[in-house]
Image (cartoon, rainbow, N blue to C red):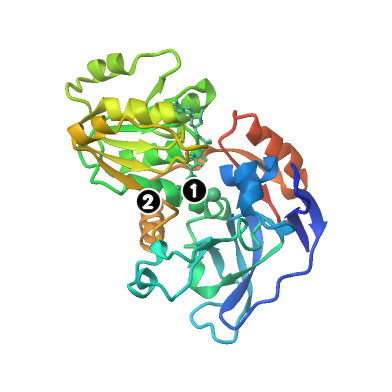
């Protein structure tokens, strides 16, 4: 099969012929149709410090996918050949207290497909049946391919009650933009999204009814005053990984405000903890999606009017991956979806 492989411990990815993965009794084999390129894949492509410490070489990469079941392990029940599916990319153990207690997303043995174990940028993917999420008929393959990052957005946005709340989102990358759409969908009052990249802010305005603010040139205080937010934002969703954005968020929140933090700072960074203490802020770290509550909620929201499709700005053949990765590295794209069916 064709697969995108991290074949060498250096920048780049290589489209290679690989054996079709073997499945175990509790796995399914998925014929991959569409995949999404994630910021994580960009780190792996560029081979930064994190990637070189984390990703084994050689290995098939990629973790955002939709496809169709073509083979089923002997112990698997309730799934069928030809079924359209996506799935959770975090493969967990079943030994920890968290997993045995049903809090699967908190299992410390979690391994990521396409990061720690072979991934989905390939014609076929072997996946534990436990991880499979069937796709309803009204969710097409290209939406199926971006459920993983939409799930990050949903997990973060639904961390706190947003109904009637004023929400500040820092970082208008694909996930921040989708989180803005989710915040709107569930009934936030004002949703302000910040970035320093005008193209990303323009895209945010196309996907969701939000107030985009370029913090490189515009004053957030003035925006707050214009919206009539005397005391600040009630909830912050940090989706940039930029230390400056986090500090700005802390300054802009109300007393007792809440922060859900998805963005990953590139290195340890200082925080003025006294501000968090005296403002009595609640800070929640977010990793991945909740298995499988986030999946249920996001599919249900997509079926009840949540529309994030415009966050997909490029559709390309898998063979054109070099161009796709370079486009994403340029920072001007939203989601890029690769087609594996040709
Ligand atoms: P992205 O890199 O595409 O978007 C980040 C955006 O933040 C960019 O548009 C950038 O211009 C903007 N930014 C930079 N400095 C800023 C500032 N000072 N103020 C406001 N915005 C600023 O990332 P993404 O794919 O949308 O993901 C969002 C973040 O979430 C990233 O940090 C990513 O690593 C992280 N992430 C975490 C998880 C998890 O499980 N915790 C999963 C996926 C992604
Ligand atoms: Zn991803």
Quickly name the residue at label 1.
149
Q: Say which quadrant the N terminus sits in.
A: bottom right
Q: Marks 2/1: CA distance?
A: 10 Å
Q: In the figure, 289 relative to 21: above or below?
A: above
Secondary structure at badge 1 equals helix
Indicate yes or no: mark 1 CB to ligand 2 under 8 Å. yes
Q: Position of residue 172 (x, y in %)?
A: 46, 31
Left/right placement of residue 71 relative to residue 92 reads right
What residue sits 32% from the left and 42% below the top? Answer: 185
Side (left or right) of 325 relative to 137: right
| Residue closer to the observer: 273 or 263 | 273
Residue with the mark numbered 2? 155
Q: Residue furthest bottom?
A: 74
- Along the viewing direction, whichever of 314 and 238 lies nearer the viewer: 238
Residue 75 position in % (x across, y down): 55, 86
Query: Callout 2: helix, strand or loop?
Result: helix
Quadrant in the picture for the C terminus = bottom right
């Amino acid at each position: 099969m064709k697969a995108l492989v991290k074949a060498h411990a250096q920048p780049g990815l290589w489209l290679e012929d690989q054996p079709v993965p073997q499945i175990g009794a509790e796995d399914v084999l998925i014929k991959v149709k569409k995949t999404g390129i994630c910021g994580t894949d960009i780190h792996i492509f560029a081979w930064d410090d994190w990637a070189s410490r984390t990703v084994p070489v050689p290995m098939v990469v990629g973790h955002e996918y939709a496809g169709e079941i073509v083979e089923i392990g002997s112990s698997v029940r309730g799934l069928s050949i030809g079924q359209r599916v996506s799935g959770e990319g975090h493969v967990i153990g079943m030994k920890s207290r968290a997993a045995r207690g049903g809090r699967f997303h908190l299992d410390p043995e979690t391994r990521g497909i396409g990061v720690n174990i072979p991934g989905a940028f390939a014609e076929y993917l072997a996946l534990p049946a436990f991880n499979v999420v069937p796709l309803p008929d009204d969710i097409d393959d290209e939406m199926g391919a971006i459920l993983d990052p939409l799930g990050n957005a949903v997990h973060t946005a639904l961390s706190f009650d947003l109904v009637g709340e004023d929400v500040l989102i820092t970082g208008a990358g694909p996930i921040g933009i989708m989180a803005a759409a989710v915040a709107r969908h569930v009934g936030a009052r004002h949703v302000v999204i910040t970035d320093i990249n005008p193209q990303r802010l323009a895209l945010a305005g196309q996907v969701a009814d939000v107030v985009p603010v370029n913090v490189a040139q515009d004053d957030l205080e003035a925006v707050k005053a214009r919206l009539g937010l005397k005391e600040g934002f009630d909830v912050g969703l940090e989706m940039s990984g930029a230390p400056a954005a986090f500090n700005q968020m802390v300054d802009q929140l109300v007393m007792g405000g809440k922060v859900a933090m998805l963005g990953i700072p590139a290195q340890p960074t200082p925080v003025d903890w006294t501000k968090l203490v005296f403002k009595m802020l609640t800070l929640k770290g977010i990793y991945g999606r909740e298995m499988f509550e986030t999946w249920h909620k996001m599919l249900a929201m997509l079926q009840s009017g949540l529309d994030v499709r415009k966050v997909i700005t490029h559709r390309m053949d898998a063979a054109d991956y070099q161009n796709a990765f370079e486009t994403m590295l340029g920072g001007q794209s939203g989601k890029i979806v690769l087609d594996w069916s040709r």
